[in-house]
Amino acid sequence: MKEQIPVAGGKAHLDCLALNTNSGKLFVFECKRGHGSFDGDKISAIDQRLGRIKASIGAHARSKGWAPVSIEIFILSFYRTTWNSAYPIYDKNTISSLFEPCIGRFTLEFMDHLETMVASAYGTELRDAVDVDRGQTIFDMLDEQMDARGPDVLFTKDGADFVAAQYQE
């Protein structure tokens, strides 16, 4: 479960909150997994959300007994997608500049692992070309007997995620 903090207008879920106790730096970052470009409304929503978090994170840190020397808020883009944002955008190759070398290496290897797992689990469902004979439609190719238990997509205001399919038997 993601940590929640109170912000203007409600609560915000934090993708990651990390305090380096040696340096006193508090890192807050939002993970984005999108492949494509974000439209203006999406970019604005991301920046507004991070702005509300930035305004509230100091009080949240103090409530945990932390006294950060500095706070850095940024976006971690899993697939190296970038856009014009009020906040820095790092990818799996540049994130290591913020953390100790071992953490940067872990992040790089973990993200590579996630990409491999997602590709192996969902690659064929998402990327197979549809080959339909002339005179047929894709609906003619459906196999009614096939167990259709595959991933569902859950759409939220922040994007979409694969979730386990929900079935009633």
Image (tube, rainbow, N blue to C red):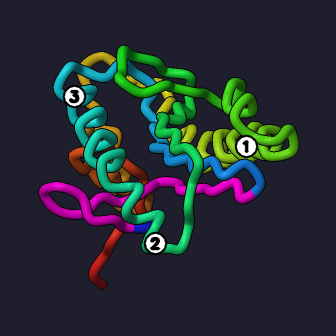
Residues at circles 3 and 1 in contact by the CB criterion of under 8 Å: no
Instruction: Give the residue at x 24% y 58%.
Output: 7
* Identity of the residue furthest to the right in this view: 102
Residue drawn at the location 50% of the way across and 44% of the way down: 29
Compare residues 92 and 167 and report the one nearer the observer. Answer: 92
**Count of numbered marks:** 3
Dot 1: element: helix
Q: Position of residue 16 (x, y in %)?
A: 53, 54
Which badge, 3 or 1, is on the more N-terminal residue?
Answer: 3
Q: Is 60 situated left or right of 56 in this image?
A: right
Q: Is residue 15 magenta?
A: yes
In this rendering, which labeled residue sits more in front, label 2 or label 3? Answer: 3
Q: Considering the image in quadrants, where does the C terminus appear? A: bottom left
Q: Residue at x 69, y 25 (%)?
A: 94
Label 2: which residue?
A: 1
Q: Amino acid at mark 3?
A: Ser
In 3D space, how far apart are the residues under numbered discs 2 and 3 (Cα atoms)? Answer: 25 Å
Identity, as a three-letter code, of the amino acid under mark 1: Thr
The residue wearing badge 3 is: 44
Task: Give the residue pinned by disc 1.
Answer: 107
Query: Label 1, label 2: how many angstroms apart (C-alpha)?
Result: 20 Å
In this picture, which residue range is highlighted in magenta? Answer: 4-21
Mark 3 crowdedness (10 Å alpha carbons): few <14, some 14-19, many ≥20: some
Residue closest to the eye, 160 or 92:
92
Considering every residue shown, the one lying at the far bottom of the view is 169
The answer to whether one can see residue 164 in this image is: no
